[in-house]
Image (cartoon, rainbow, N blue to C red):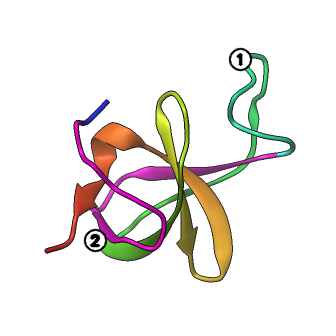
């Protein structure tokens, strides 16, 4: 996990070749498997929707909510 101090509404940078995940219920359950995924083909910007517990940020990207590994997200300055 990264040590970024991000809050809801922050603009974040996600590099190319990063996998974004959607879950049927939530990302907190260890037994939960993603039901949809998307790999970024180019670097993108997204809006931070929630700083989830654990390994994921919840972001808003192209009108949908996705979970992304915290180590793959960078703060926009």
Residue 66 location, x and y as percent? 61, 58
Task: State the residue at coordinates (31%, 46%).
Answer: 72
Going by the image, does 53 lie left or right of 6?
right
Task: State the residue at coordinates (37%, 41%).
Answer: 70
Examine the structure image and report whether residue 67 is included in the region drawn in magenta.
Answer: no
Residue 61, quarter of picture? bottom right
Q: Which residues are magenta?
A: 3-23
Q: Residues within 10 Å of mark 1 (few under 14, many from 20)?
A: few
Going by the image, does 56 lie left or right of 74?
right
Q: Is residue 42 visible?
A: no
Task: State the residue at coordinates (58%, 82%).
Answer: 62
Q: Is residue 69 visible?
A: yes
Residue 32 location, x and y as percent? 78, 27
Disc number placed over residue 55 in the picture, else none: none
Q: Which residue is mark 2?
A: 43
Which residue reaches farthest top?
30
Which residue reaches farthest right?
24
Q: Where is 4 relative to 66, above or below?
A: above
From the viewer's side, name the closer residue of 28 and 5.
Answer: 5
Q: Which residue is mark 1?
A: 30
- Residue at disc 2, secondary structure: loop
Mark 1 touches mark 2? (CB < 8 Å): no
Residue 26 location, x and y as percent? 77, 40
Q: Residues within 10 Å of mark 2 (few under 14, many from 20)?
A: few
């Amino acid at each position: 996990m990264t040590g970024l101090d991000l809050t809801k509404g922050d603009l974040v940078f996600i590099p190319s070749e990063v996998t974004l995940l959607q879950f049927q219920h939530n990302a907190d359950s260890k037994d939960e498997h993603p039901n949809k995924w998307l790999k970024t083909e180019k670097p993108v910007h997204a809006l931070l929707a929630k700083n989830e517990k654990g390994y994921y940020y919840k972001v808003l990207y192209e009108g949908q909510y996705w979970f992304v590994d915290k180590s793959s997200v960078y703060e926009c300055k």
